[in-house]
Amino acid sequence: MAMTLIEVMAVTVLMAMVAAMAMVSLGAADGGARMLSAVARMKDLDFRGRLLARTSGEAARLAIDPEHNRIMLRQVGSDTLIADEHLSVTVVFNADHDRAIQSIQFDRFGHSIDYAIVMRREGRTIKLNVRGLTGVIDQAEGSP
């Protein structure tokens, strides 16, 4: 039993539509994975900054370069670059009722001000609220 040309074309079109829908869902999953990776890296950088300050006895600074989506961790006394991370999301540090700031400084005990990290990618926003005294991080997913 042979298929006509129209039937072959119909099957090909249906397969192309299924493949296109699969690609869209895979693209959304990739964006979500990149966002989760950025959240994990930001939590890690905050922890490393606090740990660096406590163990070295010197202040540490977590600074943002918004033009290049880079986050840098430096030891303040020697200005040594400890970490330089490029994130695939837009990152903003906020303090005092959403006032944007360029850096977070950890004192020699690993304490900082309370601040928020707002990350955006492709219409999705995630906000991390950081308690400066303890370093506890609460995640609140925002709306697009």
Image (cartoon, helix red, strand yellow):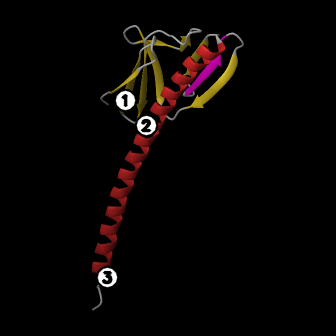
Q: Which mark is residue 5?
A: 3
Q: Amino acid at mark 1?
A: Thr
First to last magenta residue range = 70-76
Vertical side of 56 occupied by 12: above or below: below
Q: Which residue is mark 2?
A: 36
Q: Amino acid at mark 3?
A: Leu
- Name which quarter of the figure residue 77 lies in: top right
- Residue at screen point 68% across, 22% down: 81
- Name which quarter of the figure residue 71 lies in: top right
- Residue at screen point 64% across, 18% down: 74
Label whose residue precedes the other's in the sequence (1 or 2): 2
Q: Which mark is residue 125?
A: 1
**Residue 134: horizontal and vertical position, in percent?**
45, 14
Tag in front: 1 or 2: 2
Q: Secondary structure at mark 3?
A: helix
Tag in front: 2 or 3: 2
Q: Amino acid at mark 2?
A: Leu
Left or right of 121 on screen, residue 46:
right
Q: Visible in this render: residue 66?
A: no
Label whose residue precedes the other's in the sequence (2 or 3): 3
